[in-house]
Amino acid sequence: MEKQQFKAESKRLLDLMINSIYTHQEIFLREIISNASDAMDKLAYLSLTDQNVGLSRSDFAIDITVDEKERLLTVSDNGIGMSREDMEENLGTIAKSGSLQFKKDMEQQEDIDIIGQFGVGFYSAFMVADAVTVISKKYGSDEAWMWQSSGADGYTITACEKEAAGTQVIMHLKADTEDENYSRFLQEHELRSLVRKYSDYIRYPIRMDVTKTRVKEETKDSDKPEYESYTENETLNSMVPLWQRAKKDVTEEEYNRFYQEKFFDYENPLATIHLSIEGNITYKALLYIPARAPYDFYTKEYKKGLQLYSSGVLIMENCEDLLPEHFRFVKGIVDSQDLSLNISREMLQHDRQLKLIASNLEKKIKSELKKLLENDREKYEKFFNAFGRNLKYGLVSEYGMHKELLQDLMLFWSSKEQKLVTLQEYVDGMGEGQEHIYYAAGESRQRLSQLPQMELLQDKGYDVLFFTEDVDEFIPQTLQKFAEKDFKNIASDDLGLTSDEEKKAMEEKNEAAKPTLDFIKETLGDRVKDVRLSATLKSHPVCLVPDEGMSFEMEKYFQKMNPEMGFKAGRILELNPEHAVFATLQIAVAQDPEKAKKYVEVLYDQSLLMAGLPIDNPTEYTDRICSLMQ
């Protein structure tokens, strides 16, 4: 029995595979099981043309056995097996995939689905084992062979006895250290968990003897029954993934149960998207839109992404590249055999296939949400209450790159309809003569409904959209227009409601009131950018509007984000020339300037309060009110 050496480059690669390539030690079991599945795929494929195989697909199985005392973990299959030459070729040269070669040798390659095509995972066993033995007998051969290795020092191949075709991989686990607990891979619950996590959808049963308890027969009817342990061979994996079945064969109950169990949610999803795509890249997907946001959704701890499988084998727990940020709330699974994976199967070698899948999924998710909006408004509003803010951030991010995709999904509160409406619904309901989309931004609907500027628009029967989230006010700047209609902030912009004659008349009034306006400017100093008469105020005496460039809501937003930056919108004080208070102020300016100054300070503070801005000194404000009341 002569020990043979790995090729020089293989020694280095073996060291890398043991110490560097794989992120988690537990991956080894996925790799060994996948190779076993691969071997059975090959024999199943041969059985289509070779009647002597004598096995049907239902006869194939993978068995896991444990010997805790000897620290042995064995994975066995009844697949195609290996000859001595196969062992030399596939186990003696690392990074040689026998499965890929098998596929190349076969005709009608597109019909063959072989897991091993994306690398050799066999050597991952050396992450947890200090010695590995492979016993194998190839289908159609009378000889069996045993391959043994303790790692980079080489390997031996000797003849041995084995009754049926197939392969056994016997791993002698390393001794535990202070840092590593290798014994856990001999524990029944750990093996069961790893099979469910990584190999649950391998198409063949993965079996293992498991320990169970039962009542002893002789004590079954007694007041104090006694229990005994027994061993039963159990299939650990579910084999047929839900997403591999045709949509017509899956009930809504099955979809919901799978979602709740897979993604640990006690509520049913709002929508399910089941896809089977064939084309430039073939894949299946099962996506869910949750009914509520997870508690950590808006934190850094939240992990977006879909579970990525290749031929039923879990490759990545959270593949972020499959979901755009604005659809990060979607849960689900993508399974494709066309992905180009690296040797560890944990990273993609090329992102072209992934980009194709991601692009298609984005369109499908948008389509499903639009369908939900049109066909089940109540359910969509529930979704929007949970994830609407995320869609809004997606719309305004990246310089509005996604606005065409997302603008139709937006909902805003309508002051006229007293409910959430889409932008298209707002435009469709615009009153006669209305040329703009009006909106108001603030902390709450109640406060916005009481803005002084609302009166004129309500009198005209015009609707106003209420923006109550920080991100809302960035949306008009991103969209610029919707359905060829401009956006108008009722607290900032010229509302476009005054005629040329009215504008001219207002200019004349401003000129006539110049002494009073100059007095107000002088009293307030640099606290205001300008003072002028208003053409929009109805019953209120005063209001505050921002100068061009920044609204008051943006000021609040930036102050919240970074108070030290001192962002501040320019303040313009507008007064209602038809209000009795303005006439009183004019008289005071002429007859009692000191009292007039108090009037000005009170009116300015009132304008701040109505705009939702803090007043500089609440105590002084109340003192002035009391002084004027005396």
Image: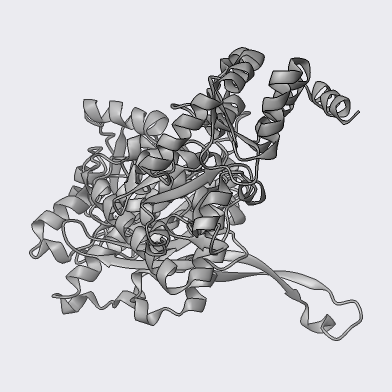
State the residue lying farthest toward the bottom.
Answer: 221
Where does the image place residue 538, in percent across and percent down from the top left? 59, 46
Q: How is the image coloured?
A: one colour
Q: Is residue 134 left or right of residue 351?
A: right
Q: How many marks?
A: 0
Residue at 45% x, 37% y: name it: 505
As drawn, 138 above or below 583: below
Residue 175: quadrant of the picture: top right
Q: Nearer the viewer, residue 82 or 596?
A: 596
Q: Does residue 262 appear in this view?
A: no
Where does the image place residue 136, in percent across and percent down from the top left? 30, 56
As drawn, 8 above or below 272: above
Q: Is residue 148 left or right of residue 299?
A: left
Residue 107: quadrant of the picture: bottom left
Where does the image place residue 492, in percent across and percent down from the top left? 49, 36
As drawn, 305 above or below 429: above
Where does the image place residue 302, in percent across and percent down from the top left? 54, 42
Q: Nearer the viewer, residue 53 or 189?
A: 189
Residue 480: quadrant of the picture: top left
Q: Does residue 541 appear in this view?
A: yes
Q: Quadrant of the C terminus?
A: top right
Residue at 33% x, 76% y: name it: 246
Q: Nearer the viewer, residue 40 or 454?
A: 454
Q: Quadrant of the N terminus?
A: top left
Residue at 29% x, 34% y: name it: 3
Q: Nearer the viewer, residue 421 or 397?
A: 421
As drawn, 243 above or below 66: below
